[in-house]
Image: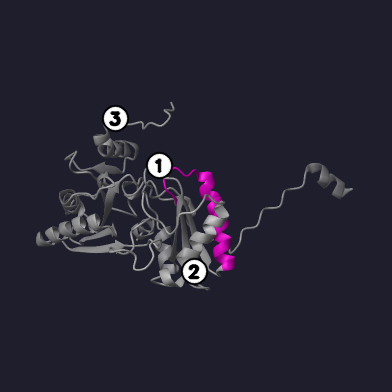
Amino acid sequence: MALQGKKLINNPDDVVTEFIEGLVETYPGLQYLDGFPQIKVVLRADVVGGAYDKVAVISGGGSGHEPAHAGFVGPGMLTAAVSGDVFASPPVDSILAAIRAVTGTMGCLLIIKNYTGDRLNFGLAAEQAKSEGYKIEMVIVGDDCALPPPRGIAGRRGLAGIILVHKHGEPGAAVVELQSIDVVVEHVLKQILSQETQYLPITRGSNAVLLINGLGATPVMELMIAARKAVPELQLEYGIAVDRVYTGTFMTALDMAGISITIMRSDENILQRLDAPTKAPSWPVGSEGNRPPAKFPVPVPPSPSMKDDEVK
């Protein structure tokens, strides 16, 4: 059934809770905390607070960016994800409930995006958890290079780069007429790799991981066309060895058109972690393994008639 210009939902106030209920029905390895509609937490079904013997990894943020973050919960990635309402940071009580639910003696790592609401609420929850005796550390991801220096009051925003950190309607750089995807990719790569926008320069001779992310309304065909341009551009024009390519829909903004590109420096240590097995439903499991410096098409096999002619 197709409904032009409409959403297939029930009450708009219930979309987040109903999304979570559908997610855990789809994937047996996921569960959610009781306490709807206030508590919106997805967690691994095999993890019980106090019994988990590894460091718990929790992320989250406003809804509307699916599959982030609940789609990356599972062995090998997140232990739990906390969802707020659409484009709203999750409340402190929800974050604290997630910490209590999955954190054992090894403690908990919170991975959050650099937004004021997320930093405030996750920070408050972390301090409360510490006062209750939990070991808590926090990593803040700010990977957006679109904002010009000094990059606003809050600094770089967190975008799809947080998905790489897990395995371990906003202003952009410019407003232009619609251009071909090759031109767009060239512009974005130049913006990312320009010296003035880098914390850790990725220079000629570096190894890197490339992530091409659809923002919600971008079909797979367009994402693959972007990958076809980005990989050789990085290797031939910038001299950067691309070790892994992840192309798909990882962090969206409802049905926003367009793509984001993330480049992360890599080494053997990072690659081992990216290739480590995971059951998180939204991680692209088919992308692991070393890739050649360049891809060449496989020759077309000769037809049987051509083989017969060669024998004669």
Q: Magenta segment: does it hold 181?
A: no
Q: Is residue 245 left or right of residue 73?
A: right
Relative image position of residue 18 (x, y in whole percent): 27, 35
Asked where in the image residue 257 lies, by quadrant, the reply is: top left
Residue 289 visible somewhere in the drawing: no
Find the distance from the CA under tag 2 to the CA under tag 1: 33 Å
Crowding at dot 1, Cα within 10 Å, few <14 / some 14-19 / many 20+, comes out as few
Q: Quadrant of the N terminus?
A: top left
Residue projecting furthest to the right: 312
Which amino acid, by three-letter code, is at mark 1?
A: Asp
Q: Earlier in the sequence, mark 3 or mark 1?
A: 3
Q: Nearer the viewer, mark 3 or mark 1?
A: 1
Q: Is residue 15 left or right of residue 303?
A: left
Q: In the rendered image, which residue does mark 3 sit on?
A: 10
Q: In the rendered image, which residue does mark 1 sit on?
A: 255
The residues colored magenta run 213-237
Residue projecting furthest to the left: 131
Q: Is residue 186 left or right of residue 55?
A: right
Q: Secondary structure at mark 3?
A: loop
Which amino acid, by three-letter code, is at mark 3?
A: Asn
Q: Magenta segment: does it hold 228?
A: yes
Whether label 3 touches label 2, CB < 8 Å:
no
The number of numbered badges drawn on the structure is 3
Find the distance from the CA under tag 3 to the CA under tag 1: 18 Å
Residue 85 visible somewhere in the drawing: yes
Q: Earlier in the sequence, mark 3 or mark 2?
A: 3
Q: Is residue 57 left or right of residue 258?
A: left
Residue at the spot 22% in from the left edge and 64% down from the top edge: 137
As drawn, the label of residue 207 is 2
Q: In this orientation, which residue lies closer to the viewer: 165 or 141?
A: 141
